[in-house]
Image (cartoon, rainbow, N blue to C red):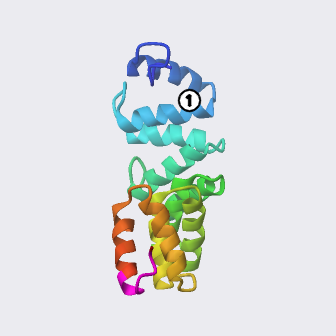
Amino acid sequence: MYQNGQGVPQSDKKAVTWLRKSAEQGNADAQFNFGVMYDNGRGILQSYEEAVKWYRKSAEQGHARAQASLGYMYANGKGVPQSDEEAVKWFRKSAEQGNADAQFILGLMYGNGLGVPQSDEEAVKWYSESAEQGNSKAQLILGFMYEEGKGVSKSPEEAVKWYTKAAEQGNENAQSRLKNISKKEGGIVN
């Protein structure tokens, strides 16, 4: 309540007090949000190590957003030694629960061979999962994969479909790709 000012004046310090109590009692949502407060230095001195501690407690209870946050911490070496392998482990747990951001990042990791063997096919799988949920960045990259035939059969029609979905959300790169593919494919885009 205090964290977002719902029904009470917004106060990061009061939010930290109540989140700590609930987090220490094992509440996964509170543990995640307490980790966010440490991660961003809101109402408490910023500490990536403490953020990782609380994200981990929540993630181990199956909290998808905490799992993704822990993946980010490992990917960027914040509060823990940088490890693409550990990042993949946590992104995968989150992605398998349907977290669109984690699915997108997992696609990037497969596409670039970070922490896993490089695989365009596996990248496409995760981009598709994320794109189906409306992630415009995943839609853009999925369009590119279809345009270039990376991990999938080349398909200008599928490329246009995904670029259009991303462009409709204001993704400028997708709008640019649509113009380019229209010229390249001789007016396939209406």
Residue hosting label 1: 30
Q: Where is residue 82, by image quadrant?
A: bottom left
- Residue drawn where x is 35% and y is 83% of the image: 183
- Residue drawn where x is 34% and y is 62% of the image: 172
Write the start and end of the magenta stretch as one range. Answer: 183-189
Q: Give whichever of 78, 101 is nearer the camera.
A: 101
Q: Is residue 43 magenta?
A: no
Q: Give whichever of 150, 74 is nearer the camera.
A: 150
Kind of element beneath mark 1: helix
* In this rendering, position of residue 63 left or right of residue 146: right
Report x, y in % for residue 34: 49, 31
Q: Is residue 184 magenta?
A: yes
* In this rendering, position of residue 17 left or right of residue 77: right
Residue sitting farthest toward the top: 8
Vertical side of 88 occupied by 10: above or below: above
Report x, y in % for residue 59: 59, 44
Question: Could one spot residue 167 in this view of the protein?
Answer: yes
- Residue kind at label 1, given as amino acid type: Ala
